[in-house]
Image: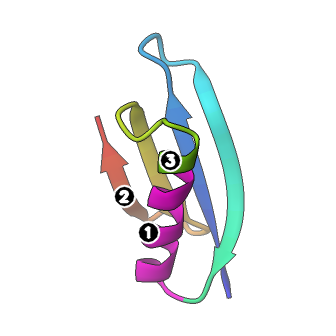
Amino acid sequence: MADYFLTAFDPAGKPLVNERFEAETEEAAKEHGEALLQAKELHSHTHRLVNGAGKLILFHR
């Protein structure tokens, strides 16, 4: 299991969500991150998902 960090921002750049979770693979982390964004209705906001080393897995502007 690896750590992943999901952050979503409002238009002014203020963080709306900043969550850490674990996943087996990058693809599983991406799916989980997208599900969290949908559940919180933040999928249309700027967001990013990175792994523990800082590698960008998902980004939307």
Q: How many marks?
A: 3
Q: Which residue is mark 1?
A: 30
Judge the density around disc 1: few (<14), some (14-19), many (≥20) Cα neighbours within 10 Å: some
* Label of residue 58 in the image: 2
Judge the density around disc 3: few (<14), some (14-19), many (≥20) Cα neighbours within 10 Å: some
What residue is drawn where x is 44% and y is 58%?
A: 34
* Label of residue 37 in the image: 3
Which residue range is magenta in the image? 25-37
Q: CA distance from mark 2 to mark 1?
A: 7 Å
Left or right: 11 as drawn, with respect to 9 = left
Contact between marks 2 and 1 (CB within 8 A): the answer is: yes
Q: CA distance from mark 3 to mark 1?
A: 11 Å
Q: Quadrant of the C terminus?
A: top left
Left or right: 4 as drawn, with respect to 34 = right
Q: CA distance from mark 2 to mark 3?
A: 12 Å
Query: Please, is residue 49 above or below residue 31 in the view?
Result: above
